[in-house]
Image (cartoon, coloured by chain):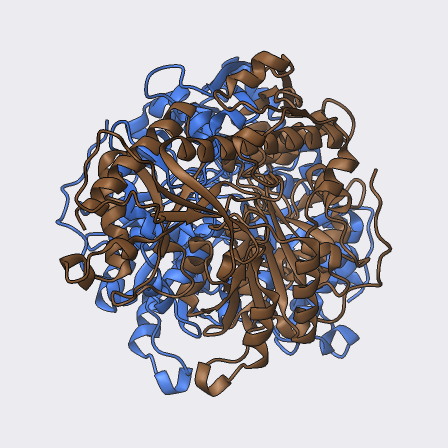
Chain colours: A brown, B blue
Amino acid sequence: MSTHSEKYGGSIDLSHHLSDVAKNRELSPLKGLQKYMQKPGIISMAGGTPPTDYFPFAKLSGDLLVHDSFPLSSSSSSTSFSWLWKLFGVADKTKTDTVSVSKLPDVPGGLSLAALLQYGPATGDPHLAKAIREFSANVYQPAYSDWTTLVSVGNTEGWARVVQTLFNPGEGFLVSEWTYPSALAGARPYNLKPVPIGMDGEGMSAISLREVLEGWDESARGIKRPHVMYTVPVGQNPTGATMGAERKKAIYDICVEYDIIIVEDDPYYFLQQGEYVPRDARVDSREEHDAEKFIASLAPSFVKFDYQGRVIRLDTFSKTIAPGCRLGWFTCNPLFAERLERAGETTTQSPCGFGQAMVASLLTHWQYDGYIRWLQALRLQYKHRRDFLIDSLADEFHLDLSIGTSGFRNGSQVYNVSFKRASAFSEKHSAQDGRPIFSFVPPSSGMFVWLKLHLEDFVPPGSPSAKIGIKQLETNLWVAVAEAGVLLGPGLYFSATPVTDDMHGDGHFRLSFSSTTEEDFKRAAKLLSTTFRKFIKDL
Amino acid sequence: MSTHSEKYGGSIDLSHHLSDVAKNRELSPLKGLQKYMQKPGIISMAGGTPPTDYFPFAKLSGDLLVHDSFPLSSSSSSTSFSWLWKLFGVADKTKTDTVSVSKLPDVPGGLSLAALLQYGPATGDPHLAKAIREFSANVYQPAYSDWTTLVSVGNTEGWARVVQTLFNPGEGFLVSEWTYPSALAGARPYNLKPVPIGMDGEGMSAISLREVLEGWDESARGIKRPHVMYTVPVGQNPTGATMGAERKKAIYDICVEYDIIIVEDDPYYFLQQGEYVPRDARVDSREEHDAEKFIASLAPSFVKFDYQGRVIRLDTFSKTIAPGCRLGWFTCNPLFAERLERAGETTTQSPCGFGQAMVASLLTHWQYDGYIRWLQALRLQYKHRRDFLIDSLADEFHLDLSIGTSGFRNGSQVYNVSFKRASAFSEKHSAQDGRPIFSFVPPSSGMFVWLKLHLEDFVPPGSPSAKIGIKQLETNLWVAVAEAGVLLGPGLYFSATPVTDDMHGDGHFRLSFSSTTEEDFKRAAKLLSTTFRKFIKDL
């Protein structure tokens, strides 16, 4: 089904990365009973398991969309999502099959509520665990032989378990200078210190990473050199950058050199949309469904370069099935997996049985190939959404393409955005001189467009606005936009280091294109234009 | 619907109990956006939420047993569970109704997969949260006014969140001398020290508690006086003891005096079975369904005495619906609830949407009264199971009733168990002299019978067995029983203090009567008899 690269041997000994908490976790004494539990005919009076007769659900059923509900076509027009449906007639997002799980298995060895609604191991339902392992083998292709997978309750819980497993309080961890706020929020209570690394168009910069590590001065920094990196390498949150194979290899090699564990939080892996092509240059296209070809077209995971077993990959069904699944998995070395499993036993135990039942049913019913077909189409949906948002901005603003030369935009296509000349519009401060109000790099993956706001360029010297820092300026604009009817992600939430009141420079907004309707994209672009105009005029 | 006792004012300030980790948790900055999120017509481009169109499940359905599937009758015969069904003809554990949740609500404001499968708040689905709050109000009746409820992912996760919220590493916590191993396992990695408190027939002893606290010697103990108590007050695990109102009041008052937070882990609350009546004295009975009367017949929760808000009650659907729900809730003061909610946000987020959908559907469909009817019958099922197990022991052993005078049996009915005189049996060491091999107090709640093993009474002086401690002796018997085909809970797993090799005294086994079939109860009793005989003979 897939071409695995030749495997290295097993993972190397990385036990020195384990936290004191992780080392102190004991194998449940009940595990010692397991050899007897398997014994045929054994009468178990050991556990506090209710009899399945008392489970009030006799059957659980789901109306499941067919796996090819969404088309594999991309259109050059972006006037309407429904256009796609009409033209190709492939998709029918109302056609469903029924999947169900009864109290007793419908086929020998099949899924059953008797098992799924009972206490279960932290390794999850065996059918689900098997499907997940096969998926990681085919799609991510870890480079060493003894890698393993383990279910989690989603990537937030996955990261929380990693925090407990790898960190002693007060340690530092490497992170992109702009990063996912919830990952920071999960680490902060344990007094963990994010150490920001510079970015470019592919996300975290290998050059910046080496500089930070090489020049690490423990006494100046107040903490030891970090031994863990947290990264969202695909559809980086918030910048939307995607890290290609070469960059990943370079970063991996540095992590080998400095003995760093890479935590690859990768919820957007299947939302890889490729380069943004302006509307006028866009052509219709239609993909064939070919699982292997599709997988090969995607940026590889860090685990594909992981010949030592130093990557903990976090996967989730949140973006590919639904967030409410609260189901994901780790792909990592067996030592970490065992400690993560122990941590699961005394926290979430196993994931919810109803959720496991439906996700396992989906994977069983669609099969691997059907699920990949679903993912292949899903990414086109997000591509279309991204395109529609940028097109909507192009309708309301003037977009100028350039190539970024510094920071996280280095080498990327950058759109500089200025106001369109409005004929019946007269302004005191004309921002119609072509100076960019904001700029952005079209994201190649994920759900977000990251705007850099050049607000301070428009602040008249000596005005009250000149006295406030970018934090307040960004917040003022955010509030103005929200009051006008559009809710954006405030840029300062994504800074790995706190933004203080006296800082000057560019502000940022994160625009999500994941769930807005076409009409609202258009309305939002219009509202941004009028609000920005007014805001800049009043500076 | 229920008679609430007069409420005290609000909870007192207990913020000094919060751990450093809990204090460091920040309100998610995104919470600041909430006031705008509610605004009608707002276009949200802030979050990374997939559109509900891409959720592959259009509908989730469950075949739900009718709420009166199990009878409210108790029979004096215990030859067969099925007897109940036959005689009263009330129960039909195959009769089901269909409950379902569609992508969009079937009624305005109703449950929907669009909401349940989306990212949700750590407070859970509002329908579920409301039902849970009403349930706690009606059933547990907290004594103060500003108590609140908050969903968890079951009591193991609930306790894990409490550990993070109340403890700094290395602190001690009060616990019964015999206790639930998983609670210890969840605390041990953080170097928390269980401080065992003596027990009697109602579980934790108030006298022993006061002694420990009064005489606390920090330098001798090496730790500060504990500020948290962990307790399973109903169907205490492993002893099966139930703490009545008076004892709870006494313990609560001591906790007020010494400023202690009570964590009430109460999974067996609805498995209150009352006193064991020997088979010959048992009479048929049939209860009426009356929710209020039924609730009033149960031992009250600690929260009913909690006029200061110092109880964190942990509830779970694991024993009343199914463990696979992975759903439970906290009942506690608003300060702790807020910190526990923050902890949820960066770990499990919200409970699984599929599970919430089905549990909320059950509660909505059965309604409060129907759910109470289910619980009322469920407890009779477990009563019958308990009776059947003890009856089975009585078939194979000789049982002598006495009143306990010390330790956790003080004041309780104690059954001393010796071998029956087997006519065609000749033994070297005759244990047929009436000396008890083991003894037990019939549990009044829960799922377990706790056997005290008097093995050392049978060890011939100078024999090899006399040289080994009770740990090894218990283990040897456990293995012999397991090899014979019965898996029991090894007593030493439940000791709050480690059992060392050189300790002497009584051993223990925990026998679960939760899920064994009638035939297996009988087989198990026979196997215990023959294995114990052989084991004692060979000592």
Most foreground residue, B245 or A122: A122
Residue shown at 47% from the left, 43% from the top: A448
Q: Is residue B171 visible?
A: yes
Question: Does residue A401 lie above or below A466 as drawn?
Answer: above
Most foreground residue, A93 or B261: A93
Residue B120 lies in quadrant: top left
Most foreground residue, B408 or B312: B312
Q: Work out which quarter of the rendered image holds the N terminus of chain B and state it.
A: top left
Residue B160 at x, y percent in the picture: 46, 57
Side (left or right) of A285 relative to B104: right
Q: Is residue B505 visible?
A: no
Side (left or right) of A183 relative to B419: left
Residue B430 at x, y percent in the picture: 75, 60
Question: Does residue B486 lie above or below A376 as drawn?
Answer: below
Question: Does residue B440 lie above or below A520 as drawn?
Answer: below
Residue B159 at x, y percent in the picture: 44, 55
Q: Work out which quarter of the rendered image holds the C terminus of chain B and state it.
A: bottom right
Residue shown at 68% from the left, 48% from the top: A299
Instruction: Tally the marks.
Output: 0
Residue A245 lies in quadrant: bottom right
Residue A264 at x, y percent in the picture: 61, 56
Side (left or right) of A5 relative to B41: right
